[in-house]
Image (spheres, rainbow, N blue to C red):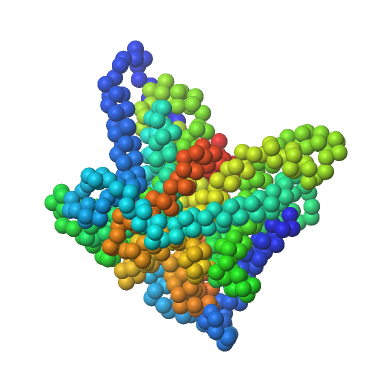
């Protein structure tokens, strides 16, 4: 790296610096407006009475705001039921994932056993297999067990999370061995070691994985579409798509209100857990 | 240890292994007749214009969304770094599309693109342009789907770049500044070379996300008009779960899998080329 040296001079205030700062902010704000526009338009439209939705021209905000669309949306579609299904499915997936993943991640991080490295390579290989590739075989498997159109069909395929094993193993490896040795000397069994020593130390990692898992499965649209036929078992993404198709064209205000109801819970979770969420991804990217 | 592998074997490894025999039979889901056809499904696939079209659309979509998301994500990351106290709020704003439920937001986008009462056409008319039917005109529909793809991925790229930028030692920039390097020279000499591992990672992550796009296409255009936005995931869904042609769907899944393996191996090769500090 060679850069020509200018003659040393006394630093002066430069108007160009001010201009640059202003243009950077202008760029960010313009981009932020474009990025957030669909959210603003969704909320704005959801508050408009029907005749305003069809008014020509561009009007972000209603002149006579009303919550009527929300009342109509809740009457016409079992939105509460969709949200409940989302909680049941995402929650069950997360709990089962943690039960299954934590011991496996601990074994990979802290124990030596024959074939360990080969098995870990398999876990890494599983990371690149997306749901579309396994969709038909998994559908057939669940169908053979008579589970199509049930909650287990939405939950079971995701319990063995390769990503979770990979992520938690990273964290388990960073814990100083002395702590674990001390606990073992004190007569702590492997199970108690994991639950009472390891887990408190890796709470941030588990929280990061939890957020990631909930977001992924709450938002999943493809799998419910494949294994669920009755609308009362739909999770929010499938529910809103189904509702939008049923109402298309006539009642955009009502559809937007339903979209707001579906989007809000996760957006709230994201805003609360933003730092954890973003840090977990950063961690995976830098160390992965 | 064991339970984790039971689930992985059943729903991942076993499923992938099962694709091989499955792709060699002619079987309609729900019917009792299965016929061994060898490589017949693959012959059918390679002879089908719809397959090549899906491959082409997926390639165009992935290249466009990947490139634009990486470029915009990097620009946002560089700009936000200088945004001072508002950094957190801006980060949240740009990341929101990644976290928000895509299927609901795709419904919102469908309304925005609507030919009759969509706001995009309303803006076009207001500035004196002609309204167009975004989702029913083939090249416009692909453009619309790509736009939504960039919107939902650029925040992800931005977060990865921000993480990468924080690992660059401040002294390097200070040293370059003392040597009188301009902002552009600093970027080219310090920032960009040191960001290359993160850039590679971001390219892989965004590519894998883009290749697997389904929700926005299904809701915005359902693969139409006339296959103009028919990405591979949508073709697989159609063949497997609307035509119930299990064998044919399995052969498409095999190609899908092969594509992802190629992307991943390319990444591993590239890993050796980028220099870590």
In the image, farthest residue toward the top: A10
Give the vertical position of A110 relative to B147 (above or below). above
Give the vertical position of B1 relative to B45 (above or below). above
Residue B91 at least partly seen:
yes
Measuring from the top left, give residue B209's x and y in whole percent: 47, 55
B110 to the left or right of B251: left
Q: Quadrant of the N terminus of chain A?
A: top left
Q: Quadrant of the C terminus of chain A?
A: top right
Quarter occupied by residue B134: bottom left
Residue B146 at least partly seen:
no
A123 to the left or right of A225: right
* Count of picture labels: 0
> Which residue sits at x=60%, y=70%?
A147
> Which residue sits at x=45%, y=75%?
B242
Give the vertical position of A254 relative to B136 (above or below). above
Q: Name the foreground residue: A63 vs A29.
A: A63
> Which residue sits at x=78%, y=49%?
A112
Measuring from the top left, give residue B63's x and y in whole percent: 39, 56
> Which residue sits at x=86%, y=38%?
A187
Q: Name the foreground residue: A25 vs A258.
A: A258
Measuring from the top left, give residue A246's x and y in whole percent: 36, 66
Q: Name the foreground residue: B126 vs B171.
A: B126
Q: Name the foreground residue: B218 vs A129.
A: B218
In the image, farthest residue toward the left: B128
Measuring from the top left, give residue A225's x and y in whole percent: 48, 66
A115 to the left or right of A75: right
């Amino acid at each position: 790296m060679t850069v020509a040296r200018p003659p040393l001079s006394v630093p002066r205030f430069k108007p160009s610096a001010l201009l640059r700062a202003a243009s950077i902010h202008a760029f960010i704000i313009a981009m932020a407006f474009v990025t957030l526009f669909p959210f603003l338009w969704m909320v704005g439209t959801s508050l408009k009475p029907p005749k305003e939705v069809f008014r020509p021209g561009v009007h972000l905000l209603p002149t006579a705001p009303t919550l009527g669309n929300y009342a109509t949306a809740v009457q016409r579609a079992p939105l509460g039921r969709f949200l409940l299904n989302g909680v049941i499915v995402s929650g069950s997936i997360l709990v089962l994932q943690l039960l299954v993943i934590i011991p496996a991640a601990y074994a990979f991080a802290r124990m030596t056993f024959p074939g360990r490295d080969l098995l870990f390579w398999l876990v890494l290989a599983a990371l690149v297999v997306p749901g579309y590739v396994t969709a038909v075989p998994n559908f057939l498997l669940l169908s053979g067990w008579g589970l199509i159109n049930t909650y287990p069909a939405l939950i079971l395929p995701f319990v063995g999370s390769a990503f979770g094993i990979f992520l938690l193993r990273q964290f388990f490896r960073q814990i100083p061995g002395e702590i674990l040795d001390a606990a073992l000397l004190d007569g702590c069994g492997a199970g108690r070691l994991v639950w009472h020593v390891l887990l408190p130390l890796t709470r941030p990692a588990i929280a990061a994985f939890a957020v990631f898992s909930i977001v992924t499965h709450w938002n999943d649209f493809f799998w419910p579409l494949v294994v669920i036929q009755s609308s009362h078992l739909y999770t929010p993404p499938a529910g809103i798509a189904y509702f939008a198709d049923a109402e298309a064209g006539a009642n955009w205000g009502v559809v937007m209100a339903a979209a707001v109801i579906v989007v809000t819970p996760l957006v709230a979770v994201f805003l609360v857990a933003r730092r954890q969420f973003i840090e977990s991804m950063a961690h995976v990217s830098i160390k992965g | 240890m064991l339970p984790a592998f039971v689930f992985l074997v059943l729903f991942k490894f076993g499923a992938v292994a099962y694709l091989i025999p499955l792709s060699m039979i002619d079987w309609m889901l729900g019917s009792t007749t299965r016929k061994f056809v060898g490589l017949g499904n693959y012959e059918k696939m390679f002879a089908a214009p719809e397959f090549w079209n899906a491959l082409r659309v997926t390639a165009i979509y992935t290249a466009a969304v990947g490139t634009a998301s990486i470029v915009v994500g990097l620009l946002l990351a560089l700009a936000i770094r200088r945004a001072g106290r508002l950094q957190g709020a801006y980060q949240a704003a740009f990341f929101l599309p990644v976290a928000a439920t895509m299927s609901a937001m795709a419904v919102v986008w469908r309304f925005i693109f609507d030919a009759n009462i969509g706001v995009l056409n309303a803006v076009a008319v207001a500035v004196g342009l002609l309204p167009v039917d975004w989702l029913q005109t083939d090249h416009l529909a692909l453009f619309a789907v790509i736009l939504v793809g960039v919107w939902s991925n650029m925040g992800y790229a931005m977060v990865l770049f921000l993480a990468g930028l924080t690992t660059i030692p401040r002294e390097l920039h200070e040293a370059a500044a003392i040597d009188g390097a301009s902002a552009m020279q600093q970027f080219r000499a310090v920032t960009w070379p040191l960001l290359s591992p993160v850039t590679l990672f971001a390219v892989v992550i965004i590519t894998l996300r883009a290749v697997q796009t389904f929700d926005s296409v299904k809701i915005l255009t359902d693969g139409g008009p006339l296959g103009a936005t028919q990405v591979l995931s949508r073709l697989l869904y159609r063949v497997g779960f609307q035509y119930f042609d299990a064998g044919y769907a399995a052969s498409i899944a095999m190609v899908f899998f092969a594509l992802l393996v190629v992307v991943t191996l390319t990444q591993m090769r590239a890993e050796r080329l980028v220099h870590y500090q």
